Structure formats: structure tokens, C-alpha cells
Image (cartoon, rainbow, N blue to C red):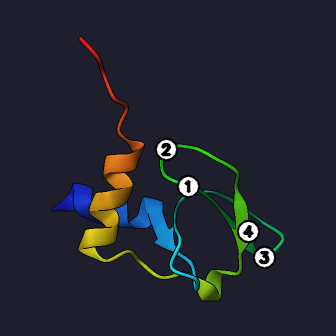
């Protein structure tokens, strides 16, 4: 349960519905990076929300490395 709360804090959803991992903040903007990597984007903090359980599950899936055997 505590880990789920930590993951919800680690990931946020912007006003357009994009899920991102919080990587920092600067000059009044929060910077997000797509799960699994990619280019960061800036969002005003008041335009962010916590992900739904489904959005969080997808973000965690995309950010999990694939291991081949």
C-alpha cells in the first residue's frame, strides 16, 4: 500500500492525459519524462493530477526493463 502511494507521487498526469515520471521542478514548472524514457516536458503544477490505477499500471509496465534470457 505504501509503495502504491510512492508510485502515485512519482508519476503524474498532465491536462492532455499524458502520464509522466516527475524528474524535477524549476521556475514554477514540474518536469515530466515519459515512462521508459524520452524527452522531458514542463507542466505547471496546477495542471497535474495523480494517475488512476489503470494509468499507473501502464506507466509501471512501460518503465520496467525487458530482460531476455
Depth check, front residue: 9 or 61: 61
Give the CA separation, mark 2 to mark 3.
25 Å
Residue 59 position, x and y percent, is 38, 57
Residue ranking furthest to the left: 1
The disc placed on residue 28 is 3
- Upstream in sequence: badge 1 or badge 3: 3
- Residue where numbered disc 4 is placed: 42
Residue in the image at 84% along x and 70% along y: 27
Label 4: which secondary element: strand
Work out how far the residue at label 4 is from the one at label 2, CA to CA, in angstroms: 17 Å
Compute the Cα span from label 1 to label 2. Answer: 6 Å
Q: Is residue 4 above or below residue 55?
A: above
Residue ID for mark 1: 34
Residue found at the very far front of the displayed protein? 68
Q: Earlier in the sequence, mark 4 or mark 2?
A: 2
Instruction: Report the disc number at residue 52.
Output: none
Mark 2 falls on what kind of element?
loop
Density class for disc 4 (Cα within 10 Å; few <14, some 14-19, many ≥20) is some
* Precedes in sequence: disc 2 or disc 3: 3
Whichever of labels 1 and 4 marks the residue nearer the N terminus, that label is: 1
Judged by depth in the image, the label closer to the viewer, 4 or 2, is: 2
Where in the figure is residue 61, as x and y percent of width and height? 31, 49
Q: Which residue is mark 2?
A: 36
Which secondary structure, mark 3?
Answer: loop
Q: Is residue 61 left or right of residue 9?
A: left
Q: Position of residue 35 (x, y in %)?
A: 48, 51
Residue at coordinates 37% horizontally, 31% vertically from top-left? Answer: 65
Amino acid at each position: 500500500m505504501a509503495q502504491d502511494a510512492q508510485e502515485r507521487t512519482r508519476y503524474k498526469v498532465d491536462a492532455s492525459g499524458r502520464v509522466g515520471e516527475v524528474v524535477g521542478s524549476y521556475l514554477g514548472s514540474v518536469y515530466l519524462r515519459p515512462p521508459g524514457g524520452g524527452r522531458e516536458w514542463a507542466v505547471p503544477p496546477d495542471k497535474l493530477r495523480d494517475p488512476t490505477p489503470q494509468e499507473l499500471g501502464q506507466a509501471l509496465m512501460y518503465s520496467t526493463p525487458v530482460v531476455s534470457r
